[in-house]
């Protein structure tokens, strides 16, 4: 067939095939792929950041084996929060400072993000300078795959799980890399206590549609905490704006969507 000036002429069979190829769902998800995608490291760390990675990270890292509990990490029972891919750690640090009697676990494979989070944990101590605020003793960090840690947390042990602005993997063939997929959501549901909360945020329209589609399949596990459409367009209280979100909104002109789900 000759293409016209608007593109190739498509038969009904072509249209159906293209629709199937562009569907957001592909078999497999991060729980079955068992590998990490994306950058592990960016620009070289500054001397102070490297010192935090060398000295502070081993002190607050996950234990090498065994169940991960509040008692194991903090020496006492307390509500546990888990953040999947914390970026630079601003949200995690804000929440930990706001809730000092709670325990926070963050997992991030990007070393530069881990270094930024350690600066928050240390109180802003960097390259011998005095801290900007008191240290945050209620944070523990895993430099690596969040699912490795999540699997070791006992069922029903978490009060909150956060997945904020994950990599959207916008191409359909990469949809199985998205954390918002059936396998991870089943795992999150298992680890949340009844009444616990799962928070998800994105500024990517493709990921938004994919997430809504997937969450419809998990209505028996999660109740969407929404009363009107505008609710997921307004940042809830206690949910700070991170530098990434600010850049998405102001530099790229993206709309941002906020979701809260309660574990049934």
Image (cartoon, rainbow, N blue to C red):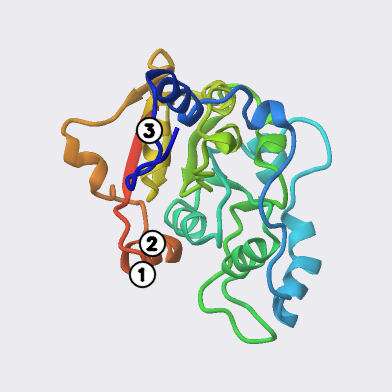
Q: Residue furthest top?
A: 220
x, y (%) of residue 9?
37, 33
Q: Residue at x 67, y 28 (%)?
A: 31
x, y (%) of residue 215?
41, 24
Residue 195 in sight in this render = no
Residue beneath disc 2: 248
- Dot 3 and dot 2 residues touching (CB under 8 Å): no
Camera-side residue: 256 or 61? Answer: 256
- Helix, strand or loop at label 2? It is helix
- Nearest to N terminus: mark 3 or mark 1: 3
Residue 146 lies, with reference to residue 26, above or below; the image says below
The label number, if any, that marks residue 3 in the structure image: none
Picture quadrant where residue 11 is located: top left
Is 41 situated left or right of 21 in this image?
Answer: right
Residue beneath disc 1: 251
Q: Residue at x 56, y 67 (%)?
A: 120
- Dot 1 and dot 2 residues touching (CB under 8 Å): yes
Q: Residue at x 33, y 44 (%)?
A: 258
Residue beneath disc 3: 9
Tell me how far mark 3 sits from mark 1, CA to CA. Answer: 38 Å
Tell me how far mark 3 sits from mark 2, CA to CA. Answer: 37 Å
Quarter occupied by the C terminus: top left
Picture quadrant where residue 225 is located: top left
In front of the other: label 3 or label 1? 3
Q: Residue furthest front?
A: 2
């Amino acid at each position: 067939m000759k293409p016209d000036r608007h593109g190739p002429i498509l038969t009904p069979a072509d249209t159906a095939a293209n629709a199937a190829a562009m569907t957001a769902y592909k078999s497999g998800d991060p729980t079955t792929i068992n590998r990490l995608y994306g950058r592990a490291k960016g620009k070289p760390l500054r001397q102070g950041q490297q010192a935090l990675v060398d000295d502070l990270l081993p002190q607050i890292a996950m234990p090498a084996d065994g169940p991960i509990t509040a008692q194991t990490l903090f020496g006492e029972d307390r509500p546990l929060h888990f953040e999947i891919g914390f970026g630079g750690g601003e949200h995690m640090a804000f929440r930990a400072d706001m809730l000092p009697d709670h325990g926070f676990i963050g997992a991030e494979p990007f070393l530069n993000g881990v270094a930024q989070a350690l600066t928050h944990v240390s109180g802003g101590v960097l390259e011998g300078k005095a801290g900007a605020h008191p240290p945050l003793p209620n944070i523990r960090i895993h430099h690596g795959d969040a699912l490795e840690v999540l699997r070791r947390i006992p069922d029903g042990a978490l009060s909150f799980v956060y997945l904020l602005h994950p990599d959207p993997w916008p191409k359909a063939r990469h949809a199985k890399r998205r954390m918002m997929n059936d396998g991870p959501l089943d795992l999150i549901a298992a680890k949340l206590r009844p009444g616990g909360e799962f928070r998800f945020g994105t500024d990517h329209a493709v990921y938004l549609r994919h997430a809504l589609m997937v969450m419809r399949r998990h209505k028996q596990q999660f109740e969407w905490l929404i009363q009107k459409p505008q609710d997921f367009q307004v940042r809830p209280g206690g949910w700070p704006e991170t530098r990434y979100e600010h850049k998405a909104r102001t530099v790229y002109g993206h709309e941002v969507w906020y979701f809260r789900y309660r574990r049934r």
